[in-house]
Image (cartoon, grey):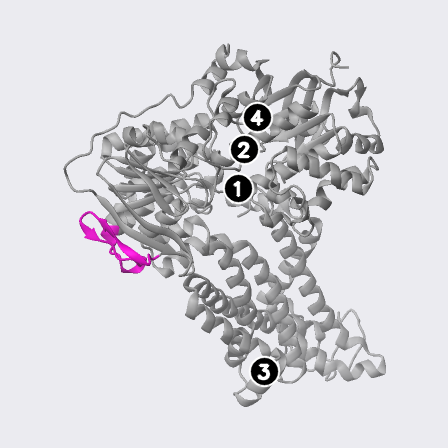
């Protein structure tokens, strides 16, 4: 049964999506088994500063002489976990509030929507910088701040999707039956809003990776000696002046991850929104 | 010229290639081996249920296939020339000048941003058939001929400034303006009320008689086609069932399927007498409005007894569906009371208790959107059982299967999704969902109007059987008088938000009539030749549309 479903999924994916999902699986597995995959300890100085690519150091060494491949593999754990947790949080908050606004209508809708507009009016990055510089710098705070800021976008989307569904006769039928708001949200609306939300989840995750990288680059994300891909770009950026490509390697990893996610999501979206089998 | 066939269709075959992801593309034959001839001044009616390939044939006569469709065999000749062999440019020349098309929904076919005049004369100008002033003058002549109000200025209006029936007639003018030899009418009256339909039908008949064009009239309503066509072809699933003169088809049908179509709506429920017991539903002096100012319902009073059927009829905009919304509590009334089972119902839905909600169920017009596409049939029918009676698990499944059997579907449907069912089956599932709550009153809002006639008949039969078995009262909202005659005990006629006539079926449908009821009753097409002419000669008032 499961193998059949897997076969079904793989045969339906486009070539782009297959390449994308291959990259994602490689990234995910190497992050999960980081201690076994990484050739060196990520914090240990094992060579000279900014050594070029060699058989010993497959991707060279960084500004302190640490192995970049090892740091990349370990950094992926941070990047994936924080971006993933922040995206999940933003989706739980965003979709629930968005659906609530759409189902309730009237004053509750106005209150939630206008509060959301207010949040969106402030540029996300500046908002995050201010909040993070005030609060203690740890992973939990980072996840919550990123999640809450991102949920404004999710709120918009889920409310728009839900408003279309709320006017359907089957929602009216549920209301006439006397069902509660929670039942309508989770049983009537959610199943029918899954396709666009799922696609959005992939994209939001990619943005969260970029956002986390930006924050780390600016020094407000992951704190040294831990690393994520954004902070690795930051640490090695001075090398670019001397023609040393170390900073480009984590940057390329971020680019490949983002593109892979987009490829997979696009393929899923085009499938689920097709005439049959979708919805 | 008149002895030659203007349009000759021979062994026409149309197919579509369907490719689902992961499956091999397969060929599906939509229209199979259709042949007919048409002379100038003649009308051929194409009739069949949805999916019969009527529209596909109509469009093929213009050498047009909908995206994905392919004319894969046979020939279509216009004055001896095969249009399938023509170049793109030659086909364009034929379309518009020799053949014109009148679509089902004029409202969707007119561009709302341009004046009617500009759109009506567009084809004539594009093909340089006449100058602009000539075209405008000709359009005015046609407006007048087809009975449109103020023909001098009518064309200067925008599409939203005229009524649906007038727009449909303007579309006929558009088709006639380039003086074509053949007009394809694709369900031109289906979206209209009976009272408006009759006027558009009359217009079409005048247009054909006066200009001597040939016509291809596509519809699913045999009674309508009998009024305008000389020949009728009955289609089913892309194949021809029967082809003959109108008289042959209506009066001496050979095939069983055609006979079924002709004899439809022979059902007639014996009327129950008014019982002495108090009514189960009393609607007293209801006023209602959506914006709080413009009253959609004005002082409506009626009642319904247990186990009986009350039909509410009227044209669109008469407030029938609004009344249903008020009774269900979706639209709080401005004034008046609703008394259900001896208790006054709160005007707001949230103040009604679960028992009141259970006892009053609703069935919708569009079964497609009345069921959550992500729930299985078992979940859809099982939910009211769980919600109202707390029945769960195996017991719930057993009762759901019992309900499925009552609606003549059976156990195998329980794990399917609504998308896997046909239109009639979906409506049956909606009936089962309402039935699961064991209500004493079901509101049926146009439940059969989206269905093909034979399927609709089955649904009505089922509703009547269930009424007998469970003693359920129906509040039946419809614009179809044939349905009303078939199922009602009492009838309420509504016009512009007011109750025009209310009483036992025999009393409402018997003379003396008020003017509106007379018009409504006389507008229902009858399956007889020459009905249209007789009615038009004896009418008293025109519909609200004009």
Q: Percent from the top left, x then y, of residue B379?
A: 37, 45
Q: Are marks 2 and 1 on the same chain?
A: yes
Q: Tell me the element at label 4.
A: loop
Residue B443's place in the image compared with A76, above or below, is above
Residue B154's place in the image compared with A154, above or below, is above
Magenta stretch contains residue B343: yes
Q: Tell me the element at label 3.
A: helix
Residue A241 location, quadrant: bottom right
Residue at (69, 82) in percent of width and height = A45
Residue B120 location, quadrant: top right
Q: Percent from the top left, x then y, of residue B365?
A: 43, 41
Q: Are marks 1 and 3 on the same chain?
A: no
Residues drawn in magenta: B332-356
Q: Percent from the top left, x then y, of residue B139?
A: 71, 38
| Contact flag, marks 2 and 3 (Cβ < 8 Å) | no
Q: Which residue is mark 4?
A: B52
User: Label 2 to label 3, Cα distance in Å?
Assistant: 65 Å
Residue at (50, 79) in percent of width and height = A140
Q: Are marks 2 and 3 on the same chain?
A: no
Of discs 1 and 3, which sits in the foreground?
A: 1
Q: Which residue is mark 3?
A: A127
Q: Which residue is mark 1?
A: B546
Q: Which residue is mark 2?
A: B199
User: Which residue in the rendered view is the most extreme toward the left?
Assistant: B276
Of discs 3 and 4, which sits in the foreground?
A: 4
Q: Percent from the top left, x then y, of residue A150?
A: 56, 72
**Left or right for A106, reference A194:** left
Is residue B391 among the parts visible in the rendering? no
């Amino acid at each position: 049964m499961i193998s059949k479903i897997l076969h079904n999924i793989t045969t339906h994916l486009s070539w782009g999506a297959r390449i994308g999902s291959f990259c994602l699986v490689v990234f995910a597995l190497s992050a999960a088994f980081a201690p076994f995959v990484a050739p060196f300890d990520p914090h240990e100085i094992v060579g000279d500063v900014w050594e070029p690519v060699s058989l010993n150091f497959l991707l060279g060494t960084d500004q302190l002489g640490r192995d970049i491949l090892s740091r990349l593999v370990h950094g992926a754990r941070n990047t994936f976990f924080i971006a993933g947790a922040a995206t999940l949080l933003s989706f739980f908050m965003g979709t629930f509030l968005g659906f609530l606004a759409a189902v309730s209508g009237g004053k509750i809708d106005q209150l939630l929507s206008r509060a959301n507009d207010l949040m969106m009016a402030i540029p996300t990055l500046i908002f995050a910088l201010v909040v993070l510089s005030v609060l203690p710098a740890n992973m939990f705070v980072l996840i919550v701040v990123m999640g809450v800021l991102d949920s404004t976008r999710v709120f918009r989307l889920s409310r728009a999707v839900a408003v279309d569904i709320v006017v359907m006769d089957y929602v009216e039928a549920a209301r006439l039956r006397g069902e509660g708001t929670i039942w309508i949200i989770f049983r009537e609306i959610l199943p029918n809003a899954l396709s666009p939300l799922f696609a959005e989840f992939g994209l939001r995750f990619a943005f969260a990776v970029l956002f986390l990288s930006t924050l780390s680059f600016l020094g407000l994300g992951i704190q040294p000696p831990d690393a994520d891909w954004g902070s690795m770009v930051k640490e090695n950026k001075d090398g670019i002046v001397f023609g040393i490509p170390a900073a480009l390697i984590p940057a390329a990893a971020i680019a490949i991850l983002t593109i892979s996610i987009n490829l997979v999501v696009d393929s899923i979206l085009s499938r689920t929104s097709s005439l049959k089998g979708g919805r | 010229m008149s002895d030659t066939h203007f349009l000759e269709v021979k062994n026409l075959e149309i197919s579509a290639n369907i490719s689902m992801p992961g499956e091999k593309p397969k060929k599906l034959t939509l229209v199979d081996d259709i042949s007919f001839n048409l002379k100038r001044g003649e009308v051929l009616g194409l009739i069949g249920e949805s999916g019969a390939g009527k529209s596909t044939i109509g469009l093929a006569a213009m050498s047009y296939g909908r995206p994905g469709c392919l004319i894969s065999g046979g020939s279509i000749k216009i004055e001896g020339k095969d249009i399938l062999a023509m170049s793109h440019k030659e086909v364009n020349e034929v379309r518009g000048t020799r053949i014109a098309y009148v679509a089902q929904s004029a409202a969707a076919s007119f561009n709302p941003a341009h004046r009617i005049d500009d759109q009506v004369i567009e084809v004539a100008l594009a093909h340089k058939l006449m100058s602009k002033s000539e075209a405008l003058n000709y359009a005015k002549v046609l407006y007048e001929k087809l009975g449109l109000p103020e023909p001098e200025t009518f064309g200067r209006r925008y599409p939203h400034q005229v009524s649906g029936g007038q727009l449909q007639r303007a579309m006929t003018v558009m088709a006639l303006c380039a003086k074509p030899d053949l007009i394809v009418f694709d369900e031109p009256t289906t979206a209209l009320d009976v009272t408006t339909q009759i006027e558009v039908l009359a217009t079409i008949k005048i247009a054909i008689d006066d200009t001597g064009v040939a016509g291809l009239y596509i519809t699913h309503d045999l009674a309508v086609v009998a009024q305008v066509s000389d020949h009728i072809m009955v289609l089913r699933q892309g194949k021809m069932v029967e082809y003959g003169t109108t008289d042959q088809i209506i009066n001496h049908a050979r095939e069983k399927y055609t006979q079924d179509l002709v004899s439809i709506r022979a059902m007639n429920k014996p009327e129950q007498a008014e019982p002495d017991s108090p009514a189960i539903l009393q609607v007293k002096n209801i006023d209602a409005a959506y914006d709080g100012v413009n009253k959609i319902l004005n002082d409506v009073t009626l009642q319904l007894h247990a186990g009986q059927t009350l039909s509410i009829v009227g044209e669109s905009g008469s407030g029938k569906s609004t009344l249903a919304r008020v009774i269900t509590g979706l639209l709080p009334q401005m004034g008046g009371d609703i008394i259900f089972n001896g208790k006054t119902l709160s005007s707001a839905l949230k103040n009604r208790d679960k028992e009141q909600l259970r006892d009053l169920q609703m069935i919708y017009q569009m079964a497609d959107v009345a069921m959550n596409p992500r729930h299985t049939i078992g979940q859809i029918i099982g939910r009211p059982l769980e919600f109202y009676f707390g029945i769960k698990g195996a017991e719930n499944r057993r009762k759901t299967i019992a309900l499925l059997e009552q609606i003549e579907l059976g156990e195998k449907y329980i794990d399917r999704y609504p998308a896997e069912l046909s239109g009639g089956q979906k409506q049956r599932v909606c009936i089962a969902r309402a039935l699961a709550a064991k209500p004493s009153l079901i509101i049926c809002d146009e439940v059969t109007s989206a269905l093909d006639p034979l399927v609709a008949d089955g649904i009505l039969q089922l509703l009547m059987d269930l009424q007998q078995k469970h003693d359920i009262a129906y509040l039946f909202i419809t614009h179809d008088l044939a349905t009303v005659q078939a199922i009602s005990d009492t009838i309420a006629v509504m016009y512009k938000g007011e109750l025009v006539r209310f009483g036992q079926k025999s009393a409402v449908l018997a003379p003396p009539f008020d003017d509106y009821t007379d018009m409504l009753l006389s507008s229902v097409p009858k399956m007889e030749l020459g009905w249209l002419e007789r009615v038009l000669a004896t009418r008293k008032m025109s519909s609200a549309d004009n």
